[in-house]
Amino acid sequence: MDLLNTLVDKGLRRELPTRDEALAVLATSDDDVLDVVAAAGKVRRHWFGRRVKLNYLVNLKSGLCPEDCSYCSQRLGSTAGILKYTWLKPDEASQAAAAGLAGGAKRVCLVASGRGPTDRDVDRVSDTIKAIKDQNEGVEVCACLGLLSDGQADRLRDAGADAYNHNLNTSEATYGDITTTHTYADRVDTVRKAHAAGLSACSGLIAGMGESDEDLVDVVFSLRDLDPDSVPVNFLIPFEGTPLAKEWNLTPQRCLRILAMVRFVCPDAEVRIAGGREVHLRTLQPLALHLANSIFLGDYLTSEGQAGKADLEMIADAGFEVEGADTVTLPEHRATAGGGCGSADGAGSGCGTGDSAPVSPEVSEARTDLVAVRRRGAGTDLAPNA
């Protein structure tokens, strides 16, 4: 397929595909999905070999968020039966993180619900970062606390944070349909604040919210422009009790096409399969490792994931290896010079502007049996999944 050969060549050169090429990946048929995976897999292996980075989530504060993000089980007005608790103490968070680190995770992601942190919250998280790093040499810590005010990213960096996560989630054109209590521009501003403070920026998307192929391409091209080191790809978990509970628009094959498109657009960024992989990729999860070089180990913020042991077995059975703590994740040019996907060095500056007709997403059977609310780990007396 000429399209795939072209995209592989561009990916190896860090050259940006055209919009038409990115849309064409999403429009390929199920019959061609293995060809798409094989092509994107060449780009993934060129930049990351067969390594899989493991990340571990610690939900520092669960539920009771004042924002109205339609996809979120912690949103204002959500009736999802999730765990709700206030801030974990630093030693509690460190103990929760230890389970993931023992399972092979090299990055701990500290997440708290809410619009954004107060200065007191930043102090809390700073103490938690110190507690984790004091007990685990070489661990990476990423904070995800919502919208940042001026100076807060610098304080987190000074406290030892390595990265900051704030997802764009969907295209600018449709953002107002998903969230009304803050704007797309607010999210872009926070990613830029993280960059400016010297933190490794982590920003991604959520697929499956009823968006068009054009929306998916728009948000991924916007991410390339922002130049995050890590791009998490979430697949909507349709929680009962949220406005998007009936949105079951994904099939395993569509998820693979989305991951492939992200890899082609951001060839040398850490592409992470995030929430919803078990729900939507299901038995095709191992194929996704040929596209993404990073996953979350164990459970998510408010939902349960695949058993940590099963994650490790899946990686080994698929012929991949867990990335060691002493290995630098990013390619050398990104790790040392900040170049790469969306950098200002001019690589792949051309971008097509063709307007393709919308492609209707395939409708998948609602698998509500696969959505399991988290009842273990942080905020409970039960052992975590790691």
Image (spheres, grey):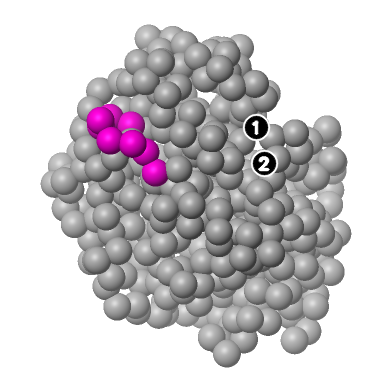
Sequence-wise, the earlier of marks 2 and 1 is 1
Mark 2–mark 1 CB contact (< 8 Å): yes
Say which quadrant the C terminus sits in. top left
For disc 2, the marked residue is 229
At numbered mark 2, what does the secondary structure look like: helix, strand or loop? loop
Whole-Å distance between the Cαs marked 2 and 1?
Answer: 6 Å
In the image, residue 197 sits, relative to residue 296, either above or below, namely: above
**Foreground of the two, 351 or 294:** 294
**Residue density around tag 2, few if under 14, some if 14–19, many if 20 or more, within 10 Å:** many
**Amino acid marked by disc 1:** Ser
**How far across and down, in percent of the image, does residue 246 sit?**
23, 66
205 relative position to 175: left or right: right
At numbered mark 1, what does the secondary structure look like: helix, strand or loop? strand
For disc 1, the marked residue is 200
Q: How many marks?
A: 2
**How far across and down, in percent of the image, does residue 127 sit?**
47, 11
**How far across and down, in percent of the image, does residue 136 sit?**
59, 22
Is 230 colored magenta in this rendering? Answer: no
Which SS does the magenta portion mostly show?
loop
Residue 254 in view, yes or no: no
Residues drawn in magenta: 378-385
**Residue density around tag 1, few if under 14, some if 14–19, many if 20 or more, within 10 Å:** many
**What residue is shown at x 56% (from left), y 17% (from top)?**
135
**Amino acid marked by disc 2:** Asp
In the image, residue 260 sits, relative to residue 111, either above or below, namely: below
**What residue is shown at x 46% (from left), y 72% (from top)?**
283
Is 379 colored magenta in this rendering? Answer: yes
**How far across and down, in percent of the image, does residue 86 sit?**
25, 23
